[in-house]
Image (tube, rainbow, N blue to C red):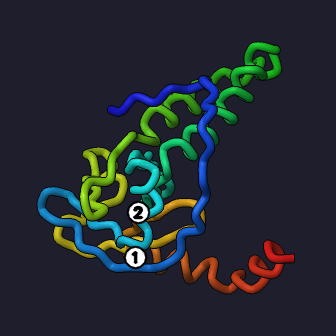
């Protein structure tokens, strides 16, 4: 399992590219997935260091490592400060559950040449049996997402009717 530092502030700046696009890609017998160039390029420009995250069953996300670390550090530091201040008394079971989920939720990975990503064990199982089958790879604004097709279509059916309202809310 990959190791990620927690609670240490990072000072480097993080650039944010707006990632968009939906693509079909096949996972090969070595569990390699070719991330489309237009999605992989912004991450490759940052050195190709990424964090693969278990999001919801049938879905993984791929973040720029520095961007993910900043988000994680802010949240963990807030929880640590609440814990130190005694504001989480009686909620230690929740803190422990958070720690367990956080320990297995993400892993450092690298995008190899031509945007090739190897899906690690544990993440493959979370995604579902996908060897030799196609996956949906899409830009989700701040990250890349990898979906099992059935999970993706189910998500679209549930959320697409809200698109216009969401667009109007965010662009107002």
Q: Quadrant of residue 158?
A: bottom right
- Cα gap from disc 2 to disc 1, whole angstroms: 8 Å
Task: Locate the C terminus and report the quarter of the image it occupies.
Answer: bottom right
For residue 70, above or below residue 62: above
Who's the residue at 49% across and 30% down the image?
100
Please name the residue that numbered disc 2 is placed on.
Answer: 58
Q: Is residue 38 above or below residue 95?
A: below
| Residue 123 percent coordinates (x, y) | 33, 49
Please state which of residues 25 and 54 is positioned toward the viewer in this rendering: 25
Taking the spot 68% from the left edge, 86% from the top edge, the residue there is 161
Residue labelled with disc 1: 150
Placement of 46 over or under 146, stated as above or below: above
Kindly check if marks 2 and 1 are in contact, taking CB atoms under 8 A apart as contact. yes
The residue at the point 68 percent across, 35 percent down is 75
Specify the quadrant that holds the N terminus: top left
Q: Secondary structure at mark 2?
A: loop
Number of the label disc, if any, that sits on residue 64: none
């Amino acid at each position: 399992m990959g190791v990620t530092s927690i609670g240490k502030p990072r000072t480097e700046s993080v650039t944010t590219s707006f990632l968009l696009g939906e693509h079909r890609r096949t996972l090969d017998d070595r569990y390699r997935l070719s991330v489309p160039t237009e999605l992989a390029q912004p991450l490759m420009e940052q050195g190709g260091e990424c964090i693969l995250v278990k999001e919801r069953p049938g879905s993984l996300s791929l973040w720029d490592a520095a961007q993910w670390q900043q988000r994680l550090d802010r949240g963990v530091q807030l929880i640590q400060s609440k814990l130190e201040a005694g504001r989480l008394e009686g909620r230690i079971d929740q803190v422990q559950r958070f720690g367990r989920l956080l320990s297995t939720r993400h892993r450092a990975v690298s995008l190899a040449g031509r945007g090739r990503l190897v899906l690690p064990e544990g993440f493959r199982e979370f995604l579902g049996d996908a060897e030799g089958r196609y996956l949906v790879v899409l830009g989700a604004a701040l990250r890349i997402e990898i979906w099992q097709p059935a999970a993706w279509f189910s998500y679209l059916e549930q959320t697409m009717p809200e698109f216009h309202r969401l667009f109007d809310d965010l662009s107002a």
